[in-house]
Amino acid sequence: MVKPPKRVAGVTAPDSHPNTGNTSHRLPGESQASAGSSTGLPGISMDQPSVQVHEIPAPQSRLEAALQSITWPADQVHLLQRLDPDSGLFTSPDGKLYAHVENEGHLLVEIQYDGRYQIPFNFAPHLPGPFLIKTERQPVWTFERPNWLAHNTESDRRNAAAEGFLTEQPIYLAPDDAALLSPRLQTPDGIRYDKHRKTYIDTTEGTVMVRKNANGEYQQTSATVRDASALLFEQIPGTRLWRRKTEQTDSVPERSPQEKRKASTDTPEPTAGSSKRLHQEEGTDATHALTESLLSANPDAINLSFGLWRNWGHSIRPRSGQHIEIDGQYYRVMQQDLNANPRLVYLQHPLFSPALYDTFEYMLRDNPSMQPKWAVKRNNQWTVLDSVAPFEMPITQYISRTFKYLSDQSVNSLARAMFNQANRSEIIVAPGLALMNLVFRYWANRGQRRAPRRELADPLLMLRPVSGPEETLAIPSSLGEGLMRLDFDPGRFSRHWNEYAAAPTAPNLRRLFSQLLADEGYVLTSSTSTFAENELLFHREKIDHVFVLKLPPLINGKLQRFQPEHFQRSEVVVQTSSSEPKPLSAYSKEKKISYLLGGTQTDVLGQTTLFIFKDQ
């Protein structure tokens, strides 16, 4: 729970009319003369213009007008003052409290005595406003729409009209009462019973009390509402879930698979530039490779109809985001080029957006059930792989299990760099997740799997080079932007370290690094006359790339740089098992050689690490 801010003046129920900035709404202790020029809040300029929240012209209903009246104008969000970086709460120039609500904008809220935040619906005193739910590790909130509010906005009504849905909503059973019913798995059609043998059915939105009418159809009934609408329901084929039955169900012919595919996807945002196209092609390759791997590993995969993911769907396709259709329900998927007719997508949890590294990593650690789910297309139908999770553990755990000598700081830095570089952006999309999945599967079984393309296949390929014309380089900070260095913790290889510490000579340092690299799975090339005593040549199987590590002495806090011309002419032959044997000069010409500098460093706290960073 976000620590609630101090109750400020103006954090009250909204007026039934838009705020006009008159002096009747001034802060306590504020004179009428100063009410128009000062907000009384720290950090807010006194000459900022007052902002008015207007009703939309010709509102369709009182409800929509009221909702508009408590929504801050999108074009004036810059006038809101953030309370703190992580709360997702803001104060307006007139002292009211607003929350950033996902897919809704900035809504007026009130803080209750128990510390919860509630959207005030004073225009309907008999209907309580919903409480906000903080999205884990993100400065954004969500809320569950009350049944009486569901599908009641103008856009929802337009969608309902297009799909043939009625505007009336079913009467849903309270969750606590629904939990007392018999399980729907006990009957083939999912019918549930209470102790009086009254019948109920489950929809994706909730549980509804029904009875069979004279035509043999199930229609809504109620034990508490006298004039309950006789809404009809039908079973979703192949499941124990039910959905609203409409006139369109009987009168409109079934759409062709091609029409369904077209209707179930949103047009992705256009992209431009050869660089973005290259990234898209690489992402497509990763997605295709992962699809083939999943299908071969799950040849008999079936739709698990009772998985929790079925609660993620909507009966009406939302206007924003990308969606696929499964059994008449629309499920949001992570962004990718759906026009390419992909066979793999990631279903997205409605309460979690896997966009940024920190929130994604915390989710995998604290609440992995909210991670996206794989859905593969087979025979023009989507199948959700509910029995296998894309990520079995946090990204940091994948790294620490694979590279056992890395320091905690390097593990964290490498995990963040992998997430950002997978999509070459701090915001991840589906092809980026697919690429990371391929990398982790390759790490777990290098002997049976091919190394994925791009630099994520190995941490040393991800290092950012230290540029500059100087002949010497200072050791970069581990806190620099991007992955600037990798550190190895001597506590994780104490036997090797103790042997070196007993005689810390240059040859023993080279021997120490040779031992570490070999233990981490690299293949070292026997030293030849081409290399100095403080240089190492190595590679990793199945990756067509070589590394040269130099361990120069530290002089005045700096290291002597490489002279790459020496290696650009070298005829020393290396075979990485992913290519034919070829000399170093060929690797240099193909830009498949990395020049690395390394050594030992002791920080101000006396902790010693072994470091490696990229020269060029």
Image (cartoon, helix red, strand yellow):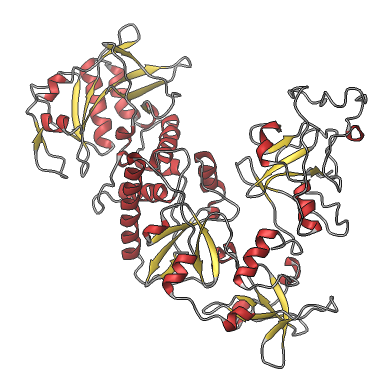
Q: Position of residue 48 (x, y in %)?
A: 75, 26
Residue furthest to the front in view is 58
Q: Position of residue 405 (x, y in %)?
A: 36, 33
Q: Residue furthest bottom?
A: 214
Asked whether, in this view, residue 107 is left or right of residue 189, the answer is right
Residue 247 position (above or below residue 1):
below
Front residue of this view, candidates 477 and 102: 102
What residue is drawn where x is 71% and y is 33%? 80
Q: Quarter of the image holding residue 109?
A: top right
Residue 255 vertical placement versus 297 (above, below): below
User: Which residue is pictured at 53% across the width and 62% down the height?
Assistant: 331
Name the outermost residue toward the top: 556
Q: Is residue 597 above or below residue 415?
A: above
Establish if 340 lies above or below 77: below
The foreground one among 472 and 139 is: 139
> Position of 345 compared to 25: left or right?
left
Q: Is residue 250 visible?
A: yes
Q: Is residue 494 left or right of residue 164?
A: left
Quarter of the picture containing the C terminus is: top left
Residue closest to the eye, 224 or 553: 224
Counting the numbered discs, the total is 0
Q: Is residue 118 visible?
A: no
x, y percentage for residue 37? 83, 23
Q: Position of residue 165 (x, y in %)?
A: 65, 72
Name the residue nearer the viewer: 226 or 557. Answer: 226
Identify the image quadrant of residue 155. Answer: bottom right
- Location of the N terminus by quadrant is top right
